[in-house]
Image: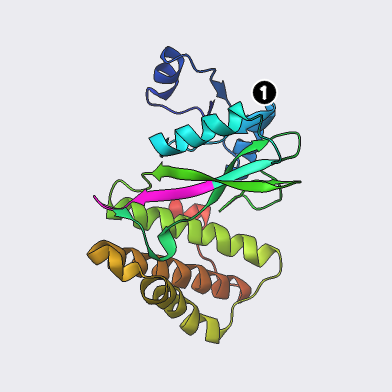
């Protein structure tokens, strides 16, 4: 386990459970995860975030893949099932949200330069396992809004740095398309009011990201300067 010098009881709890805990200053989501992969003592690694859990069905699939020697695969992906204020979202943009988390670190890892919305990749075949990775992403709506705003800024800065630009058309169309694609075309409405709120908040994330990119390309600040924060 890699800890970025947390101030709660994380290290003590993990150590008591028998985990090997390494500490490293946080300098990016992708970099932190790749560091963890590089410290592993086995070739095959399973990467989990602190808010994720293995379902019984997925555990059975993982054990079967291991017992079969991971034959014919460089990595495995599986669906991620997110809890959203008391209900698991099984439709829309939220599910199946397949992620590659089990892989041979000799043939892949958390590669690339993007530190936000990072994804693992491998050189070789990727298979899909049955079962869900259970995800508990938000404690409250306030926490979700703060998290998505932070991610929107990081993505806007990343896109701006690599030359991507927003347009007035995207400012109008992109958030609306995200909402209707997830809520209507992908059946997000089948998740009841939970699906509606989720679709609205995710559309707002796209709106924030696009607005911030527009401001950056027009020489405007998206965060307070250090003097103003002090």
Residue at the spot of label 1: 42
Q: Secondary structure at mark 1?
A: loop
Task: Establish if 27 lies above or below 182.
Answer: above
Q: Is residue 198 left or right of residue 166?
A: left
Residue farthest bottom in this picture: 169
Task: Establish if 77 lies above or below 68.
Answer: below
Residue 90 locus on image (x, y percent): 36, 58
Residue 161 locus on image (x, y percent): 68, 63
Nearest the viewer among 123 and 23 is 123
Residue that appears at 42% across and 79% down:
176
- Can residue 167 be seen in the rendering of this structure? yes
- Can residue 230 be seen in the rendering of this structure? no
Nearest the viewer among 27 and 90 is 90
Task: Establish if 43 lies above or below 227.
Answer: above
**Span highlighted in magenta in the image:** 78-87
Q: Main secondary structure of the magenta part?
A: strand
Residue 180 locus on image (x, y percent): 40, 77
Residue 54 locus on image (x, y percent): 43, 36
118 within the magenta span: no
Circle 1: is it few (<14), some (14-19), or many (20+) Cα within 10 Å? few
Residue that appears at 26% across and 52% down:
87
80 within the magenta span: yes
Q: Is residue 20 left or right of residue 183?
A: right
């Amino acid at each position: 386990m890699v800890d970025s010098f947390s101030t709660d009881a994380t290290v003590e709890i993990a150590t008591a459970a028998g985990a090997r805990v390494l500490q490293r200053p946080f300098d990016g989501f992708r970099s932190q995860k790749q560091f963890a992969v590089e410290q592993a003592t086995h070739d095959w690694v399973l990467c989990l975030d602190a808010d994720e859990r293995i379902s019984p069905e997925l555990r059975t699939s993982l054990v079967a893949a291991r017992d079969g020697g991971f034959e014919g695969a460089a990595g495995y992906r599986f669906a991620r099932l997110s809890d959203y204020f008391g209900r698991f979202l099984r439709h829309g943009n939220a599910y199946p949200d397949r992620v590659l988390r089990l892989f041979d670190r000799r043939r892949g890892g958390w590669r690339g330069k993007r530190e936000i919305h990072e994804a693992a990749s491998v050189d070789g075949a990727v298979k899909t396992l049955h079962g869900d990775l259970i995800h508990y992403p938000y404690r409250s709506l306030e926490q979700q809004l703060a998290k998505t705003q932070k991610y929107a800024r990081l993505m806007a800065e990343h896109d701006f740095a690599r030359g991507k630009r927003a347009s007035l058309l995207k400012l109008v169309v992109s958030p609306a398309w995200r909402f209707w694609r997830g809520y209507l075309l992908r059946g997000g409405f089948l998740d009841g009011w939970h699906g509606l709120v989720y679709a609205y908040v995710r559309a707002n994330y796209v709106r924030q990201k696009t607005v911030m990119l527009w401001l950056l390309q027009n020489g405007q600040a998206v965060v307070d300067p250090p003097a103003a924060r002090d």
